[in-house]
Image (cartoon, rainbow, N blue to C red):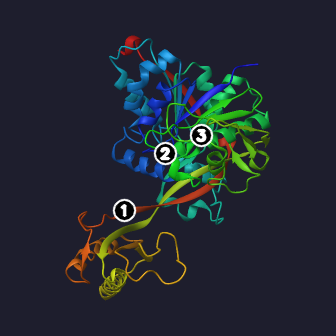
């Protein structure tokens, strides 16, 4: 029986707590550090960055992180798997190699990149070959928005990551890998699972889903008894996967947070559709078969997971330009805070109408009077100490949105009294990026793995 593989979660999104990866490496034994940076909107942001600078387009905070940890990673034998490459995995690798130049490392670092997920340059050829890339929700063919597409990336699975690990990579940098594969690819590699061992693959998928959101499975963002969870220096989850597919969710004992039946269950149902069909590029996990045993001491055992064969298709995340937006806020103070905010909204809308500006949507929220939670039972309190007026507009053209941003500030003096909270200045106009989910035959996605070794001593 092979020993369990310990895969630690270090990042759940681009912008997550930067101390977490170092703590995972330093506070206890792990075999792999999984760093998940990507979401659908993140890809379009990175693509816009690369359009401005061809060397950009990846999670830039990943490079100084690995530069700092490189000696410890090599000394402890911890390998890193990450999708920090975004839309430019090779640029990410080059930046890391440059950052390590001249560093005194125990040995050269082997850095692998996985490419092939980016379909942006192949869209016209795919469409011409009969791949409609229809919207999974509406059925519309991609041709409807083709001219406005900003980025198109297929979700790759475990195979190229496993290939990189088998080639000896210490750090594997991917683009749009499915989040869960960052956790279960090392398990396939270490435990020798077959590619059609659907139950074990499904167990890995469940483990990856638990790991992918960082501290969320270890007491962060938990509803259950949240007041008593110490999150000053939280421990992030660690998966201890056994050869037969049973595994334990835990964390380093010296850190805060909490791993219980409740925290793991909350993460399992996060972003969940049909629990019987959690689809990934490598197989389908049936979440209704999961068994959880809370063993106490921040240890939850997961077993009994069943799986089914992978599909013939891969999901494609497509981002396209869909107009412009801006959001402005003002805060109104007691007395009659809500009435003042409502009157200000009426005045603003009347001014926009008088200017003849046309918007696809104008949305108003009165934060503090139930806007975040939805309608409250009964009328809102009469003596709210303050209410934030938040108004957002969206239009196909930039001009009306730009003019809207100039109509917020005048309300300070030419509107209801006791306004504050405008120190941030005029609202910023932002381009709207819409999401277009599609499917493509997996056979047309051409992936490539490259391993580069830093020079001896990091020089």
Q: Which residue is labeled 2 in the image?
A: 13
> Residue at image x 36%, y 13%?
104
Separation of residues labelled 2 and 3 (CA atoms)? 12 Å
Q: Which residue is labeled 3 in the image?
A: 211
Dividing the picture into quadrants, the one containing residue 457 is top left
Q: Quadrant of the C terminus?
A: top left
Nearer the observer, 303 or 139 = 303
Image coordinates for residue 226, horizontal then vertical, percent: 53, 52
Kindly state the secondary structure of the residue where label 3 is placed.
helix
Kindly state the secondary structure of the residue where label 2 is placed.
loop
Separation of residues labelled 3 and 1 (CA atoms)? 32 Å
> Residue at image x 41%, y 78%?
359
Nearer the observer, 37 or 206 = 206
> Residue at image x 44%, y 14%?
108
Q: Is residue 379 above or below residue 6?
A: below
Q: Is residue 412 above or below residue 270?
A: below
Dividing the picture into quadrants, the one containing residue 56 is top left
Image coordinates for residue 150, horizontal then vertical, percent: 46, 54
Q: Which label lies toward us, 3 or 1?
A: 3
Q: Is residue 181 left or right of residue 455?
A: right
Image coordinates for residue 98, horizontal then vertical, percent: 35, 25
Image coordinates for residue 146, horizontal then vertical, percent: 52, 59
Q: Is residue 202 above or below residue 127?
A: above
Nearer the observer, 332 or 8 = 332
- In primary-sequence order, the first of circles 2 and 3 is 2
Q: Which residue is labeled 1 in the image?
A: 430
């Amino acid at each position: 029986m092979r020993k369990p593989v310990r895969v630690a979660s270090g990042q759940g999104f681009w912008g997550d707590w930067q101390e977490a990866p170092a703590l995972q490496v330093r506070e206890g034994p792990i075999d792999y550090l999984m760093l998940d940076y990507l979401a659908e909107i993140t890809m379009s942001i990175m693509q816009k960055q690369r359009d401005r600078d061809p060397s950009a387009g990846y999670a830039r905070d990943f490079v100084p992180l690995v530069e700092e940890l490189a000696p410890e990673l090599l000394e402890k034998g911890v390998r890193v798997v990450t999708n920090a490459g975004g839309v430019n995995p090779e640029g990410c690798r080059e930046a890391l190699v440059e950052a390590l130049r001249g560093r005194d490392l125990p040995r050269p670092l082997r850095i692998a990149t996985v490419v092939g997920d980016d379909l942006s340059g192949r869209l016209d050829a795919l469409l011409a070959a009969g791949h409609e890339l229809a919207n999974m929700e509406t059925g519309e063919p991609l041709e409807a928005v083709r001219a406005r597409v900003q980025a198109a990336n297929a979700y790759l699975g475990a195979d190229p990551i496993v290939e990189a690990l088998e080639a000896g990579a210490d750090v594997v940098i991917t683009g749009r890998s499915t989040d869960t594969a960052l956790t279960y690819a090392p398990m396939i590699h270490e435990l020798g699972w077959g590619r059609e061992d659907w139950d074990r693959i499904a167990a890995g998928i469940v483990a990856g889903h638990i790991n992918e959101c960082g501290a969320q499975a270890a007491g962060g963002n938990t509803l259950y008894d949240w007041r008593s969870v110490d999150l000053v220096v939280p421990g992030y989850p660690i998966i201890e996967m056994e050869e037969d597919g049973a595994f334990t969710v835990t964390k380093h004992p010296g850190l805060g947070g909490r791993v219980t039946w409740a925290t793991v269950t909350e993460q399992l149902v996060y972003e969940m559709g049909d629990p019987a069909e959690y689809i990934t590029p490598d197989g389908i996990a049936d979440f209704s078969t999961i068994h959880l045993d809370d063993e106490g001491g921040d240890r939850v055992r997961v077993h009994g997971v069943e799986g089914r064969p992978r599909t013939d298709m891969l999901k494609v995340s497509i981002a396209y330009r869909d107009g412009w937006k801006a959001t402005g806020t003002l805060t109104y103070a007691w007395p009659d805070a809500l009435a003042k905010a409502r009157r200000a909204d009426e005045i603003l809308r009347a001014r926009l109408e008088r200017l003849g500006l046309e918007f696809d949507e104008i949305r108003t929220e009165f934060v503090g009077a139930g806007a975040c939670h939805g309608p409250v039972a009964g009328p809102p309190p009469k003596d709210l100490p303050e209410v934030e007026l938040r108004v957002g507009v969206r239009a196909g053209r930039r001009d009306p949105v730009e003019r809207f941003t100039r109509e917020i500030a005048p309300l300070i003096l030419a509107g209801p009294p006791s306004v504050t909270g405008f120190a941030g200045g005029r609202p910023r106009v932002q381009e709207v990026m819409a999401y277009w989910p599609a499917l493509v035959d997996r056979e047309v996605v051409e992936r490539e793995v490259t391993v580069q070794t830093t020079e001896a001593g990091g020089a």
